[in-house]
Image (cartoon, rainbow, N blue to C red):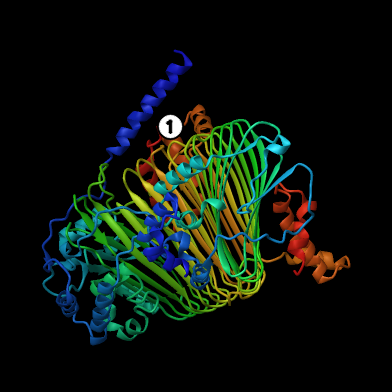
Amino acid sequence: MSLIEINLTQTMVNENLVDNIVSEPYKYGFVTEIESEKISKGINEDIVRLISSKKNEPEYLLNFRLNAFKKWKELQEPDWADLGYDKIDYQDIIYYSAPKQKDKIKSLDEVDPKLLETFDKLGIPLTEQKRLTNVAVDAVFDSVSIATTFKEQLAEHGVIFCSISEAIKDHSDLIEKYLGSVIPASDNYFAALNSAVFSDGSFVYIPKNVTCPMDLSSYFRINSGDSGQFERTLIIAEEGSSVSYLEGCTAPMFDTNTLHAAVVELIALDDASIKYSTVQNWYAGNEQGVGGIFNFVTKRGKCIGKRSKISWSQVETGSAITWKYPSCILIGEESIGEFYSVALTNNLQQADTGTKMIHIGPKTKSTIVSKGISAGHSSNSYRGLVKIGSQAKGARNYSQCDSMLIGDKAAANTFPYIQSQQPNSEVEHEASTCRISEDQLFYLQSRGIEFEEAVSMMVSGFCRDVFNQLPMEFAAEADKLLSLKLEGSVG
Amino acid sequence: MNILEKITKSDENNSDSKSNIQKISLERLRANPIPNSKNEIWRQTNKSKFSRFLDFKFSNEFYYPPIPGHANIENTCRIIIGENRAINLKEKNWAIKELEEQEILNFLKQKIIQSDSTQNWSNLLNHFLTDKKNIVGLNISGTAIPHLEIICNSANNVLNSKTLVINIEEGTTVSISQINIGDENSALSISSYFNIEEDSVVNHGIISFGKDKSHIINSLNVRQFKNSEYNLGSLQFEYDFGRLEININQVEGNARTNVKGIQITKNNEQISTYANIAFNGPNGFLDQLNKSLANDKSHSVFEGLIIVPQIAQKTDASQLSRNLLLSNFAKIDTKPQLEIVADDVKCMHGATISQLNEDEVFYMRSRGLTLEEASKLQLRSYYQEIISFLPISKERWDLLALLLKDK
């Protein structure tokens, strides 16, 4: 067989691989048949009031929602991102959907077994038998938080980890003080919508000088096709405390696009540190781009205290469209913001993601490492802002965004915005675009490593800087997820 | 009458004194008299400075500018756009021809029809304002080519508008300096078109310097064909409002582009550079460096966009934005962007913002230099990289002296 023929066979094998991988079903695409309570479609002031009353919320929260709704009506849906999608009909969405529960659940045994089965399928250590994993979980199913594990153990250390509805009842003072303090209701279109109709989410409070004894985790699951998910997460780290928080997301497959507009607010006081990790694997739609989640999320952390630190790490592999910029406002002297991201798009997925690092206080530092991988017909943009205010003397930023293109129909864009008003500061930005190197591929293959594995190794190497920042379990999961989503798309 | 009134008022514009080009530009402008400030390439623009630009009275009169530097240098052909005398190119057997008027008008008409009213607003305004007297069109070919020096100037209290169209024929090597001189309290609109045919090499320098309260909007449009090389050096300073738009299109790829520019702002000035470089064929090459230096309360803007569509495989493009912020009140905005679809490409961009290196200053001072001397020396090296790239003899313009005179 001549060399050319060998190459041809190789290409054919590769093409088959592509087919195999593309037809790989979305693992989490099942729907759980469970009785749920939904309210009628659409949004208006009555719906906002209804959601609030269903949750027995205090007056100030109702006002917060109504105010947000008013702002939302005034705002316009943003169109500056490099995204294309049909207009969302906001009146065609159910804004509240909760698994039906008769009474308040006292222990996990009382939770609908079907529901627990769902979480088992997802591999979430919800049941207390899985104590060994040492991760406390708050699971959010559609719009309502189902169960939170390890509560008592955490309480011993004074850590509060519960659903936001519980926090509204039990820790109203903290909610009133901090809710909307990082992302005001009028911040942007989707944040305003979330503020008006958010149904649940997680709340974390770490008291002074406490290092949270275990990683906290929340798991979001959208179950019905016509309801949006609007959860809200609020994490407060008091002076000298530290916490690591993990977030995972899945959804069943539907032909319709489901809206997910979450808001995450982080607050770090003096010497506190928050690490927030996300593995996002919402349903991305099929190869023709039908269905999938619209993931329009506002995430922002405020380093108020001196020497405080907020670190975002994310692996974005799902969603039909992602529009997400986890940001840090660095107010406290010597505070640190970090952003590590891997975004992978395939088929017709679109992602416009990045971060904002706003340096206000002196000697603040930030690091941005973003890795984008685009395959198929997808488009993947990095959009980031680094702003050095006039008081940020001695501020330092380093950004690096690398893109990898797989196939000649995918797009990779980079839009870094850099603004500086302080001469005594340093900003560095670097970006590069490349594709999987044929030489490296050839080398690996000549050493007996299969094509698919070789690609996987190279992608994994490309993302190493980010994976290193993820907590152990997540890093392994992310690595697996990437190979699953991607391998074989090179042909 | 200011410019906006000129655009929106109907009576005067129907007069026969307006050329066809001016009429169709006006039509396009009417729909969109001022560019959308939400658009990225206008977002950072200082509104009050821009409206001051529009407030100037338009004039098509010619004023002879004071030209600094040494007068005559051998083998140089100097053209001052708008100067009312026939350009005598034949005299020395130079291979430069003036383009036929109709040729230029047809070319511009095509451009106007294709242009987008926000992206190409500066060109539309220019074509609406410029009358035949202020358009120069040249065709360059052959080997006996002198150094070309094209001067555009604006006069006190008015807005002048100039258009330049240059076609460089196959296999020609030429160096062109474009000098824009702003008078005190004046405004200037320039649109230049370069059509660079196969196997040609163009070394182009743009030097824009104003005086107190000079305004300029300078739009450069370049089309490069196969195996051509285009080298641009640009230098902008002392403009209260300065705007340089660079559009380079490698029509068939397989071409080389080198762009190096510097902008220097002080007092309350705003100078911006917008570069848009598109590769429409394979094997394109780009090396771009933009430097800026902001002092006092000034604002310096750089936006660069590299577009690599699917057809442009094996493109090698790099863009670097280096900025020095010298004062607490100055501001620098920089945004190097990449839009890439082709997968077999090498694209890089980078940006840095910092101040003069303290260690270097310390070293020089420890060797007996004063602080002033040391920072001057540093600035000199900062400028030199760009100045040495300009296709213009240093003796003639003595640019470093111009730049360093009050730093």
Q: Residue at x 47, y 47 (%)?
A: A403
Q: Tell me, yes or no, if residue B43 can be seen here.
A: yes
Please state the horizontal and vertical placement of residue B118, each as a whole percent of the image.
42, 57
**Amino acid at dot 1:** Phe
Asked if A281 appears above or below B50 in the picture, the reply is above
Q: Residue at x 27, y 74 (%)?
A: A74
Please state the horizontal and vertical placement of residue A422, each as a whole percent of the image.
61, 72
- Which residue reaches farthest front? B16
Q: Tell me, yes or no, if residue A434 can be seen here.
A: no
Asked if B323 appears above or below B206 in the picture, the reply is below
Name the residue tied to disc 1: A451
Report the chain holding disc 1.
A
Q: Around disc 1, counting alpha carbons within 10 Å, would you say few (fewer than 14), some (14 to 19), or many (20 or more)?
A: many
Front residue of this view, candidates B300 and B2? B2
Quadrant position of residue A66 = bottom left
Please state the horizontal and vertical placement of residue A168, each as a whole percent of the image.
27, 80
